[in-house]
């Protein structure tokens, strides 16, 4: 499928893209190449191939039990904090 410059201008206008005139011809070639590649995909035999919703369909992720802990050693955890107070991380205020 060939895309002409008129179509490129129309699509750019509909997409509200400012496309300089010197980019119209190269863009038409690029889009034509993309459409040719899509046409090649239509030639692939997909007889008997089930549609997929995910590339990892059927894969099961191992689950661990959700257990609340105190971090086992709060002092060691807080040692990584740039600033802590009364056993808590101190962070800068984000919302005024």
Image (cartoon, helix red, strand yellow):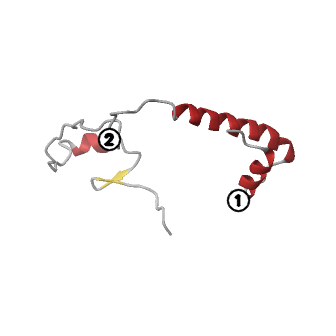
Q: Which mark is residue 79?
A: 2
**Point 46% across, 57% down: residue:** 92
Instruction: Give the SS element for disc 2.
Output: loop
**Residue at image coords 67%, 33%:** 33
Judge the density around disc 2: few (<14), some (14-19), many (≥20) Cα neighbours within 10 Å. Answer: few
The part of the image, by quadrant, that contains residue 77 is top left
Most distant residue in the bottom direction: 96
Whole-percent x and y of residue 74?
A: 23, 45
Residue 19 in picture, x, y percent from top left: 79, 49
Q: Residue placed at 33% from the left, 33% from the top?
A: 48
Q: Name the residue at 63% across, 38% down.
A: 35
Q: Nearer the viewer, residue 77 or 42?
A: 42
* Tally of numbered discs: 2
Side of 60 relative to 36 (left or right): left
Seen as rendered, the residue at the extreme right is: 22
In the rendered structure, the answer to whether residue 91 lies left or right of residue 88 reads right
**How many neighbours does mark 1 have within 10 angstroms: few (below 14), some (14-19), or many (20 or more)?**
few
For label 1, the residue is: 14
Closer to the chain start, of discs 2 and 1, is 1
Quick one: 29 or 80, which is closer to the camera? 29
As drawn, 87 above or below 39:
below
Q: Position of residue 36 (x, y in %)?
A: 63, 34
Front residue of this view, candidates 9 and 77:
9
The picture places residue 64, in percent across and down from the top left corner, at 16, 41
Residue 42 is labelled as none
Disc 2 versus disc 1: nearer the observer: 1
* Residue 37 falls left or right of residue 5: left
Rendered position, 64 above or below 45: below
């Amino acid at each position: 499928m060939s895309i002409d410059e008129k179509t490129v201008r129309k699509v750019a206008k509909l997409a509200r893209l400012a496309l300089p005139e010197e980019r119209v011809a190269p863009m038409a070639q690029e889009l034509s190449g993309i459409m040719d590649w899509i046409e090649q995909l239509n030639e692939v035999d997909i007889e008997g191939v089930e549609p997929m919703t995910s590339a990892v369909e059927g894969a099961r992720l191992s689950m661990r039990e959700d257990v609340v802990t105190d971090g086992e050693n709060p002092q060691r955890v807080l040692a990584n904090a740039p600033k802590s107070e009364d056993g808590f991380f101190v962070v800068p205020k984000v919302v005024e």
